Image (spheres, coloured by chain):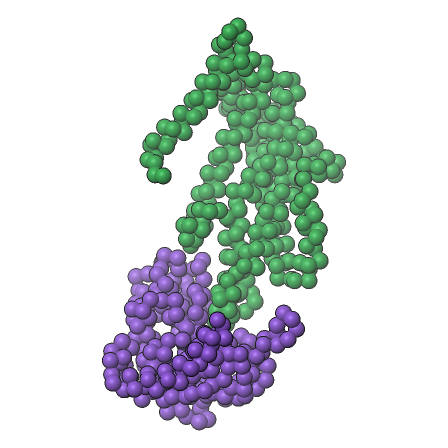
Amino acid sequence: MSHVGAEAIRFRGVTIEFPLADGGRYPAVAATDIGVGAHEFVAIVGPTGCGKSTLLNAAAGLLAPSAGEIHVLGRRLSGLSREAGYLFQQDAVMPWKTARDNVAIGLEVNGTARAEALERGQGWLKRVGLAAFGDRYPHQLSGGQRKRVGLAQVLIRDPKILLMDEPFGPLDAQTRQIMGNLLLGLWAGDRKAVLFVTHDLEEAIALADRVVIMSAGPAARIIGDHAIDLPRPRDASEVRLLPRFHELHKLIWDQLRDEVLRAYEDSA
Amino acid sequence: MRIGRGKLLVLQVLVAVVVLLAWHIGSTVPIGGRYLLPKFFFSTPLDVASRIWMLFANGTAKIVTCPEPIDFTRILNISDPCFGKTIWQHLLITLTEGVLAFVIGAATGIAAGFWLARNALMSAIFDPYIKMLNALPRVVLAPFFMLWLGLGMWSKVALGVTLVFFIVFFNVYQGVKEVSPAILANARMLGMSERQLFRHVYWPSALSWVFSSLHTSVGFAIIGAVVGEYLGSAAGLGHLIQQAEGTLDTTGVFAGMVILAVFVLIIDWLVTLAENRLLVWRPPAAASQA
């Protein structure tokens, strides 16, 4: 259901290289074309170290492609993207601010009055199930709770695009499914365009409209693009029991397995 | 090993009792016809205690019986007839020197730390000089400060500043450099301007490093003041100890040392209070290793 013309993100021939210590260049991502439609949830899956996060950083404007162009909402991206919210893999909330202050800061930077920002921050804490934890500092929260604070911090700014870099990676399996459901619930409200990077194929299928497969690096590229025709609204844990889920999983895994093995052999 | 609070206190007091008792016996009870710790060289615990008592009793009496109302603008003026170098005034002068040294050293250290941490070129240029100055034992600078700034308070403040500055400087530098890249990238993605980054990210991060070194830097501020007074001054705890030493008055030296130790303990306790209030966001493990 991608709407041409109203695309949220479009990569055109994007190549990303990193300078090496010996003066050479390491090609992380090679000539990549992908699009994320408005209101579309796209997951990128690939073996470890394949450049998924690099692609996401480029979409955020945190790093500039060596070749090719990135268009965000029809405009060519230069510098940091103002339209995108980014949820990082690592803990990125400020440890010196309480949960409520961390959420409110997303609004305060835009000049929203502190009182209003705090009030709306409390509302968002409630939506991510942390209404009673506003006064806690990040070290007093669990890993999953910190992720919820991060999610609220990003969503309170109402970005048009959501970039997520293995956001639930460090969490245990149960918490991941709970967080997946929380994300789907929040997403269903306004269906922002999402680019979701993960190494977990099951998570990708359970959440996304489309799953894009990347090859092993160096010079990683897109080698598969699968529409996920599972019904919505979904429950991130129950959807895994559907026969169609298993068909899709087998189909995509057959393709992914070779790449994972290749990446494993290269690194071994 | 876990040990109860009460038991720990008893054992701690026991150490003091044993040391004081040994000192007392050695200095007042002849063993085999001679004193192990002759009074002239070691004084006695009771003499030291009574000297401390007298210092405070006389000093306090002098202030209480002062005929004129106390003029606080002249409180540091050692020629004030009303105060006339009581123990309180010595303490106040050392405290003032220490506080000034800390405030000036911390302010300049924070400014320089931020400036060099955010400016790679300047940091590279000044790096060898900063290392050189930091390697220099600061006591050798004391005579210069006395030449330049006189025998008054400011030469002591300057000595304290040279000690505090480097501790704060290195900690702020580290604090700014070691902000987690994820927190920084996240703050940028939230749309923070350079000024907002400074206020919400760099400043709190650097401040946490400054606070984790607060005990050290406050201690050094006092050390700077006392050493400066010791080397040449007309007032302060260091002066008190130096005067006693000059007249071979061991009781006076010990009395000064005890007062200094208690004074530093009280300041350290106040620092702990401030730290606990200001670093509530820190996980306990990280805060306790400071």
Taking the spot 44% from the left edge, 91% from the top edge, the residue there is A6
In screen coordinates, is A105 left or right of B102?
A: left
The x and y percentages for residue A160 are 43, 81
The x and y percentages for residue B289 are 46, 47
- Depth check, front residue: B137 or B221: B137
- Asked if residue B249 can be seen in this view, the reply is yes
Taking the spot 68% from the left edge, 62% from the top edge, the residue there is B121
- Depth check, front residue: B214 or A118: B214
Quadrant in which residue B122 is drawn: bottom right
- Look at chain A in the picture and name its colour: purple
Taking the spot 38% from the left edge, 88% from the top edge, the residue there is A226
Q: Is residue B152 above or below residue A153?
A: above
In screen coordinates, is A4 left or right of A123?
A: right
Residue that protrudes farthest toward the bottom in the picture: A4
Taking the spot 69% from the left edge, 46% from the top edge, the residue there is B133
Q: Is residue A258 above or below residue B159?
A: below
The x and y percentages for residue A177 are 30, 72
- Asked if residue B100 can be seen in this view, the reply is no
Quadrant in which residue A107 is drawn: bottom left
The x and y percentages for residue A152 are 38, 70
Residue that protrudes farthest toward the top in the picture: B33
Q: Is residue B176 above or below residue B22?
A: below
Q: Which quadrant: the N terminus of chain B?
A: top left
- Depth check, front residue: B269 or A162: A162
Q: Is residue B103 above or below residue A198?
A: above
Q: Count how many numbered circles sit on residues in the image.
A: 0
- Look at chain B in the picture and name its colour: green
